[in-house]
Amino acid sequence: MNKTMVDYLRGEVDKFAKELASKHDLTYKPSSATYNGNDCWMKVTFAGKDINGKTSLEAAWDNNAELHGMKKEWLGMEYNGNKIVGFNTSMRKYPVFLEAPDGSGRKTTVASTINWMKLQEVKNEQS
């Protein structure tokens, strides 16, 4: 097993998982992969939606954003080249979840999110 083979397998798994998620109205998070010798492990994550059509991260954003000094309307907005996709209450230090342009997940702090978004608001007011 080598990096080239793992990258190829990951691409195949991602392609199949996206089709499966679409078929069952789920959200798919791209897989992570590790390898060692002849073995390869991949993590594939699917998320369902609540009765309002929101993922658990989006619903948690609605319930917790204002409690942490953020605004509900920031969900889906651009943050430093990434898109804000939700909030995870079990991640104490980095609860804000982001999605990079390539679809991979990122996370950041509440303080960093507030600072970035307020800076963007000031920039928008000045222009």
Image: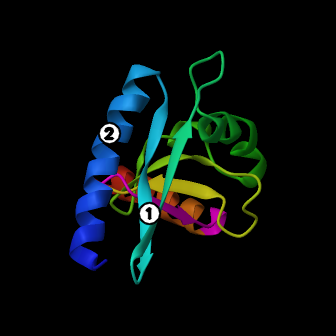
Q: Quadrant of the N terminus?
A: bottom left
Residue 36 versus residue 16 in the image, above or below: below
Query: Residue 20 at x, y = what percent?
Result: 39, 30
Query: Residue 30 at x, y = what percent?
Result: 40, 52
Q: Disc 1 vs disc 2: Cβ atoms closer than 8 Å?
A: no
Q: Report the amino acid beneath label 2.
A: Phe
Among numbered discs 1 and 2, the one appearing first in the sequence? 2
Query: Residue 58 at x, y = what percent?
Result: 60, 37
The residue to which callout 1 is attached is 32
Residue at 74%, 44% (x, y): give it.
64
49 magenta-colored: no
Of the two numbered discs 1 and 2 in the rendering, the one whose residue sits closer to the viewer: 2
Q: Residue furthest top?
A: 51
Total labels: the figure holds: 2
Magenta part of the chain:
101-111
Query: Residue 18 at x, y = what percent?
Result: 35, 37
126 and 49: which one is in front?
49
